[in-house]
Amino acid sequence: MKKNLFFTFISFLFLIACSSQQEYSNVNEAIMSLEKNITKIESPDDYILEGIQPVSYKLSNEEIIKVYAFGSEEKRESGIKHFEESIQLLSSHAPIVYQSGKYLVLYYALVDSKTRTPKLNETKFGVKIEKALNSM
């Protein structure tokens, strides 16, 4: 009996160790983990939200991720409100929007989608970005 209990306990610990997700200390670390060929880019024409200039990243497939680091969740909520108002006036292609703490992350996927904003599973990195941000 003790042997079976010990084996079950060891198996349980092994499963926990194998299933643990990588945790990231900041959004830059989470974004840079998506793939090897991600590049931080300078983009002076980026849209400024609530006085915040985003940090932009280019993925190997030419898709773009923009990260706005607001000082608080309240400022992020105000920023997303202004973004949503402005996006209605812009093109018919909208980015996938992620919100995590004080961060607003915009993923501009290059896919032909039947909807204005592509679904995560239609993109190469949508699900990966979501998992990385949830691991912060």
Image: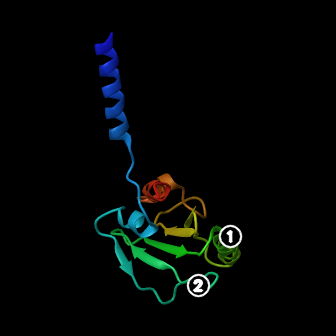
Q: Is residue 46 left or right of residue 58?
A: right
Q: Tell me the number on the disc at residue 48.
A: 2
Q: Is residue 29 left or right of residue 122?
A: left
Q: Tell me the number on the disc at residue 135.
A: none
The percent position of residue 114, horizontal first and vertical second, equals: 57, 58
Count of marks placed on residues? 2
Where 29 sits versus 68, above or below?
above
Disc 1 from disc 2: Cα separation: 17 Å
Classify mark 1: helix, strand or loop: helix
Query: Residue shown at 45%/59% (left/top)?
Result: 129
Q: Earlier in the sequence, mark 1 or mark 2?
A: 2
Q: Amino acid at mark 2?
A: Ile
For disc 1, the marked residue is: 74
Q: Nearer the viewer, residue 16 or 120?
A: 16
Instruction: Please state which of the two labelled residues, at mark 1 or mark 2, is closer to the viewer.
Output: 1
Q: Residues within 10 Å of mark 1 (few under 14, many from 20)?
A: few
Q: Amino acid at mark 1?
A: Glu
Colour setting: rainbow
The percent position of residue 105, horizontal first and vertical second, equals: 53, 68
